[in-house]
Image: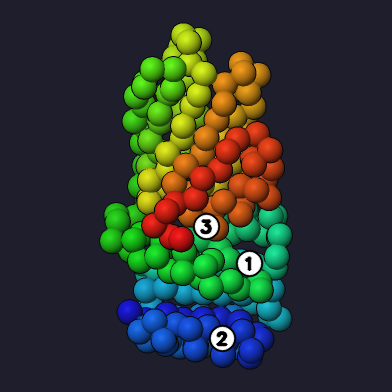
Amino acid sequence: MKILVIDDEKPTLSMFKLFLTAYGYEVYTAEDGEKGLSMFEELRPQIVFTDIKMPGIDGLEVVRRIRKTGIDAQVIIITGHGDMETAVKALDLDASDFINKPVERQALNAALARAEKRKQMPGDLDVKFIAARQNNCLEVSVKGKLTASSKEKFLGLFKDKTADGIHKVRLIFDESFSIDSSGISLLIGVIQDLMQKEITVFLENLSYNYVRVFQMAGMDKMATLKESFTEE
């Protein structure tokens, strides 16, 4: 599998090349966005890592242009540590995932595992919810991309059920799960509403990197976040 890494810092490129080559990937590197986009169209890699802050064409513009080509690729944004705003912008542009600098091996492994799984799935998955009650617990499986367009369907899951002896809600996220800024706002609103009803909320089977973005959004103060065991 081909991977392209775009970053203006040579030590970062060397680190990615070392790790990814050791994992058995065919790795290419570019020191700026313009060269990276040229290599992308030539090589058509399955996975792209791009730094967010680069001279000239930055990472967000790289994502925009890659999406305009129509070439199917998983694009993973490399952000500064704790840069919530940039991470959310990347998700709005349909980036597959993001990792923070300095890059941790666990975060890299999680991003790669998620990208490989998503490559095997159909694109633009419509969000689907499967709800089931287990005694005083409502379990909701979430598949696909959660956005503002999901609001009516998502809110409808809790409208009646949470008024009838439900004390706990488990939101279990499928491997296909993704989200944008409007979806994050929707999810926070649902959690806050459940908290007001004294219902405990669990967000489960999250990727390593989604745990980080949800923490940056303050969701760990409102719900219990549980990482996917497959990525430990």
Q: What colour scheme was applied to this rendering of the protein?
A: rainbow
The reply to whether the C-beta atoms of the residues labelled 2 and 3 are less than 8 Å apart is: no
- Judge whether 142 appears above or below 209 on screen: above
Of pointers 2 and 3, the one earlier in the residue sequence:
2
Rate crowding at label 3 as few (under 14), some (14 to 19) or many (20 or more) other CA atoms within 10 Å. many
Residue at 58 percent across and 59 percent down: it is 90
SS assignment at label 1: strand
Residue of label 2: 15
Q: Position of residue 40 (x, y in %)?
A: 44, 81
Three-letter residue code for mark 1: Asn
- Label 3 to label 1, Cα distance in Å? 11 Å
Residue 178 shows in this picture = no
Three-letter residue code for mark 2: Met
Three-letter residue code for mark 3: Tyr
Residue at 37 percent across and 42 percent down: it is 143
Q: Residue furthest top?
A: 164
Quadrant location of residue 73?
bottom left
Quadrant location of residue 45?
bottom left
Residue of label 3: 208
SS assignment at label 2: helix
Q: Is residue 196 left or right of residue 172?
A: right
Residue of label 1: 100
